[in-house]
Image (cartoon, rainbow, N blue to C red):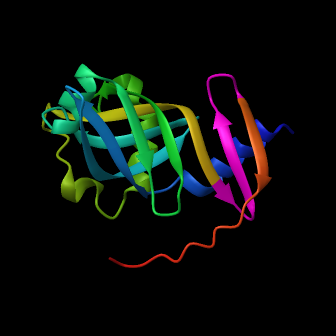
Amino acid sequence: MSAYEDGLRAMETLLARDCQFALATAENGVPSLRYVDMFFDGGCFYVVTHAGSRKVREIEQNPRVALCNRRFFAFSGVARNIGHPLKPENRAIRAKLVEAFRPWYFKHNDEADEGMCYLRIEPETGFFHRDGTGYKMDFVRKTANAFPFAFDTVLTED
């Protein structure tokens, strides 16, 4: 198995669940950052949101985004609004998102609201680590470098 394939499998293991990431967007060259819950599936990240949100408005103007979390996982790529959860083409990912976000999905989302939408983020580059191995991923070329990596940063609550 190639380092890229190994990296994708590791990402599925680590990120095919409710994960919080900081999502960076920009408008007129001014960055904007917020934490969002994400789910990784089929090589893409998914976010449940509303079409009227600042992040969606900024993505419509500039689809380039960056992601990071507290464990130094970092990705950059292109985000797209793929529409309302009840669109037929979103049926499969909706089932996965409802399950992954089960504790809060229906509490915080109203599928009767026409503005509710999903974002799909297609990563182009990224870095993450698992079990002592770091992965520098190139999703465009479908290549990766795997190398020994020790995550020894002390994480604080604040």
Task: Locate residue 81: give its quadrant.
Answer: top left
Q: Is residue 138 magenta?
A: yes
User: Which residue is drawn at the image coordinates 34% and 24% (left, top)?
Assistant: 63
Quarter where residue 139 is shown = top right
Give the image location of residue 157, x and y in percent. 37, 79
Left or right, 61 with respect to 42, comes to left
> How many numbered marks does the figure carry?
0
In the rendered image, residue 151, in percent from the top left (x then y), is placed at 64, 67
Q: Residue at x 35, y 42 (%)?
A: 47
Given residues 92 and 145, the one toward you in this image is: 145
Furthest toward the front, the residue is 29
Which stretch did the figure color magenta? 129-142
Q: Is residue 146 left or right of residue 76?
A: right
Which quadrant is home to the N terminus?
A: top right
Residue drawn at (26%, 33%) of the image: 26
Answer above or below: position of 153 versus 47: below
Closer to us: 76 or 121: 76
- Relative placement, left or right, of 93 versus 80 is right
> In which quadrant of the rendered image does the C terminus lie?
bottom left
Residue 73 at x, y percent in the picture: 54, 53
**Residue 133 on the magenta segment:** yes
Could you tell whether 12 is left or right of 119 in the image?
A: right
